[in-house]
Amino acid sequence: MKQKSFRFIAADILYISMMILPFLAAIVLKVLTTPLSNGVEITGARIFFTVPMPIQDLIITEAQINSLCVMIALSGLCLFLTHGLKTRDVSIRQHLAEWIVEKVDKLVKESMGDYFSGFVPFIISIFGLSAFSSFMSLLGLFPPTSDINIVGGWALLVFFLITYYKMKCGPLSYLKGFAQPVAFLAPINFISEFATPISMAFRHYGNVLSGSVIAVLIATALQGLSNLLLGWLPGFLGEFPFLQIGIPAILSAYFDVFSGGLQAFIFAMLTMMYVSDGFAIDEYFARKTAKQNINK
């Protein structure tokens, strides 16, 4: 029993370490690699190194490293919440895990239907990855959602899913969809089809990036205003940015927490909407029934 308890505690420590150490490593990496600067700098993800490739070099950036840290931390969180599942004497973390799964399962079924119940893990993953990526700015780290390449990759994955479910009714049905409701709208429908991932990516990227830029500009402006109004105070008091106390934290609570979580929710909802709306489920089952009748 003691050996089992020790293994259980050791596993918990490992999972908690997976949640904490990636962010600590990202902070240390940022401190060690960020050059000193004077004034305000608003830049994209820093490039760490480049891997030579035959067609195009692979660029490893701050956004990719931070995104990897979020994925490791989320894996640790999932393992921690689902460690030691029981049917009796349920722990608080198991209650939390079950609550999350039940809520997302209900959301997916209401938004997409029972046929897409298997999408629950994907929706939880895309929501968690997006939200925690935006929350990284609370630690002073570059949020991966502020990089169009990261968010564009997610949108491209969603586009492949949309196309896959549209093709489940056959290539001919997919091509006919461009001529709906009338044939002369086919060019517009074609453009709209490929505009979907672009709009999803730029909506998410633009909202997160704009929030980060506004927060930095306001914090810098408050520092300058503090020096202007209170610079007459003696010693270090004249240099201390009193006006930066509290206000940036309130802005961060909105731009980083509320807005980041909201954009993650919107991205997840758009994913469910586009995939389910693109799948002609009645036509699919009619086609499937017809094939079964022919085989009989």
Image: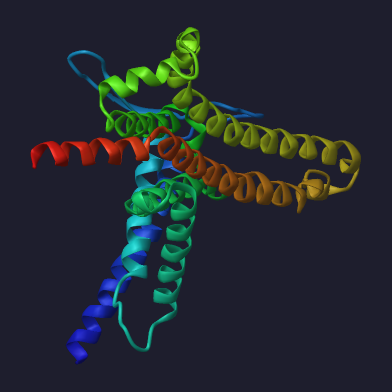
Taking depth in this image into account, of 251 and 34 the one nearest to the observer is: 251
Residue 210 in the figure: left or right of residue 101: right
Residue pictured at 44% horizontal, 54% vertical: 109
In the rendered image, which quarter is residue 280 located in?
Answer: top left
Residue 78 is situated, as x and y percent measured from the top left of the image, at 35, 62
Residue pictured at 26% horizontal, 72% vertical: 11
Residue 83 in sight: yes
Residue 158 is situated, as x and y percent measured from the top left of the image, at 38, 34
Q: How many marks?
A: 0
Taking depth in this image into account, of 139 and 224 the one nearest to the observer is: 139
Residue 132 is situated, as x and y percent measured from the top left of the image, at 48, 50
Residue pictured at 40% horizontal, 59% vertical: 20
Could you tell me which quadrant the C terminus lies in? top left
Residue 123 in the figure: left or right of residue 217: left
Residue 124 is situated, as x and y percent measured from the top left of the image, at 41, 53
* Up-down relation of residue 132 to residue 10 (above or below): above
Residue 133 in the figure: left or right of residue 288: right
Q: Residue furthest left?
A: 296
Identify the colour scheme used. Answer: rainbow
Residue pictured at 29% horizontal, 38% vertical: 286
Residue 54 in the figure: left or right of residue 259: left
Residue 61 in sight: no
Could you tell me which quadrant the N terminus lies in? bottom left
* Up-down relation of residue 94 to residue 37 (above or below): below
Taking depth in this image into account, of 90 and 146 the one nearest to the observer is: 90
